[in-house]
Image (cartoon, rainbow, N blue to C red):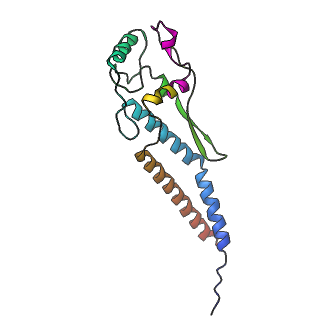
Amino acid sequence: MAKVVIKGIKGVEDSTRKVLQKAINSQELLNEVGVLVQKNIIGSARQGKTQDGVALKPLSKSWVERRKKLSEVNSTGTFYKPSKSNLSFTGQLLDSFTYEISRVNATIRLFFKGSRKPYKGIKKAALEGPATNRELAEQIEQDRPFVFIGEKLNKIIVNKVKRSLGKQLSNFNKLRKILG
């Protein structure tokens, strides 16, 4: 029986692993994914829907009336509608939604930044609500969950990463052929 030896497999395996790791840690790819997630979550919320296209819980009649009164003395966001649950009464919360990238372990951290301006026209401090956008988002998430990656967005992200990895591997193989 003949013995078959394939040389260079370990080198190819190590090189491929390095290329994949570099592609996954790519600042460009991580930024693309961060922007994609940020825009999708904000866009869905402004439409009054979750990432999966389900309408957010409707507002009660009393809350609709309260929003109308508050809008008389507060500046409202571009997407504000008194009866629509689109999380954009002033726009402060959604405008504060952002991301940052950690290249050390290739992670994208999504968060709400900054404090929020209190609404005018509220007489009881207990009704004013949280002082930061993060705290407000946590409070809202109980009744109107909107910060998650739905099935559709997940598929888009996976395909984007696959294309990026495929492109990196293709470039690596072309370079390897050229260099011998």
Q: In which quadrant of the rendered image does the N terminus lie?
A: bottom right
Q: Return the x and y of residue 90 as percentages of the image width and height.
A: 44, 19
In the image, residue 109 above or below residue 105:
above
In the figure, is residue 94 to the left or right of 111?
left
In the figure, is residue 92 to the left or right of 104?
left
Q: How many marks?
A: 0
In the image, residue 144 above or below residue 180:
above
Q: In which quadrant of the rendered image does the C terminus lie?
A: bottom right
In the image, residue 29 above or below residue 98:
below
Q: Residue at x 64, y 69 (%)?
A: 12
Q: Return the x and y of residue 85 as percentages of the image width and height.
A: 37, 26
Q: Return the x and y of residue 136 as percentages of the image width and height.
A: 51, 24
Q: Nearer the viewer, residue 28 or 54?
A: 54
Q: Which residues are magenta?
A: 119-137
In the image, residue 33 above or below residue 73:
below
Question: Based on the displayed image, in which of its 4 quarters is residue 83 positioned?
Answer: top left
Q: Return the x and y of residue 37 as percentages of the image width and height.
A: 48, 40
Q: Residue at x 43, y 12 (%)?
A: 74
Question: Based on the displayed image, in which of its 4 quarters is residue 3 positioned?
Answer: bottom right
Determine if the magenta segment contains residue 151.
Answer: no
Q: Residue at x 43, y 14 (%)?
A: 75
Q: Please, which residue is most extreme toward the bottom here?
A: 1
Q: Nearer the viewer, residue 156 or 65?
A: 65
Q: Nearer the viewer, residue 35 or 64?
A: 64
Determine if the magenta segment contains residue 124.
Answer: yes
